[in-house]
Image (cartoon, rainbow, N blue to C red):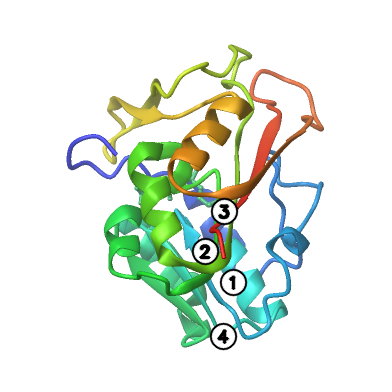
Amino acid sequence: MTGTADLWHHYGRARAGRDRAVPGAFHWTWSQDGGPGPELLGDLSGRTVGDLGAGAARHAAHLAVRHAPARVVAVDASPAQHGTATDLFGHLAPRLRIVLSGAVPHLHTAAGAYDVLYSVFGAVDFTDPRELLPAAAAALRPGGRLVFSTLAHHVGGAPARTDVTASEIPARTPDGGTATMRRWVLRAHVWAEVLDGAGFTRIGTEVLPATGEGPRAADTLLVTAHRPR
Ligand SMILES: C[S@@+](CC[C@H](N)C(=O)[O-])C[C@H]1O[C@@H](n2cnc3c(N)ncnc32)[C@H](O)[C@@H]1O
């Protein structure tokens, strides 16, 4: 995030006012309406799972209620998102733990603690991957898995980048002012290279085509990687 303003203040606010339910499904796609589900995370029963950039923690709540993990830790750096998540799903503690923290500092406190880490257009999109991905590898137990969905191209259609460079994208301050934030929109092979450099193995990428049309429709890039055993 840029500066001290919470640039995620407005995100999901309208929905939070009318939809308090634990979602009945888990989607990876940009449109959140289909495609593969939580089976990509493997069998979660008894596992320790972390959502990096969990937002309102809807995905994490679904896993906590439907998949019998030991714990799902929903990490988010935005006070607004953390507040919404706590309001909506704080009652799911202790199986769901809602943490206000940047993903990198959180992961640095959790060496080898996680069986599974995931991000749905979350912290992986908005954090320098050369910092986040090594921290994620170290926070996974040997053989642990990282799965994330991210943009396969920029919203609006511009292609993803061919090197590890952030794009400046528009954002809104809490009082409605204009701002920008950094988002890493990278080609699949670039993600694979950074993951490899961060120590991951068995790296897989897959593009899930946009289901709808319109200026904000986007293809999803789904990435899976493992910490070596
Ligand atoms: C587009 S939202 C996605 C939220 C949620 N995963 C979802 O699908 O609804 C991105 C979220 O990532 C969080 N985020 C971005 N960078 C982060 C970081 N470095 N550490 C923790 N959270 C971060 C933001 O605060 C925001 O809530």
Question: Looking at the image, is 86 positioned above or below residue 52?
Answer: below
Front-lying residue, 212 or 97: 97
**Residue 57 circle label:** 2
Residue shown at 62%/81% (left/top)?
Answer: 69
Amino acid type assigned to the residue bearing label 4 in the image: Ala
Question: Looking at the image, is 126 positioned above or below residue 190?
Answer: below
Identify the mark nearer the N-term, 4 or 3. Answer: 3
Q: Nearer the viewer, mark 4 or mark 3?
A: 4
Image check: 200 left or right of 205? left
Residue shown at 68%/82% (left/top)?
Answer: 45
Q: Nearer the viewer, mark 4 or mark 2?
A: 4
Image check: 163 left or right of 30? left
Image check: 79 left or right of 29? left
Identify the mark nearer the N-term, 1 or 4. Answer: 1
- Contact between labelled residues 2 and 1, with CB atoms less than 8 Å apart: yes
Residue shown at 39%/24% (left/top)?
Answer: 166
Identify the mark nearer the N-term, 4 or 2. Answer: 2
Amino acid type assigned to the residue bearing label 3 in the image: Arg
Q: CA distance from mark 4 to mark 3?
A: 28 Å
Callout 3 crowding tier (Cα within 10 Å): few <14, some 14–19, many ≥20: few
Identify the mark nearer the N-term, 1 or 3. Answer: 3
Q: Which residue is mark 3?
A: 15
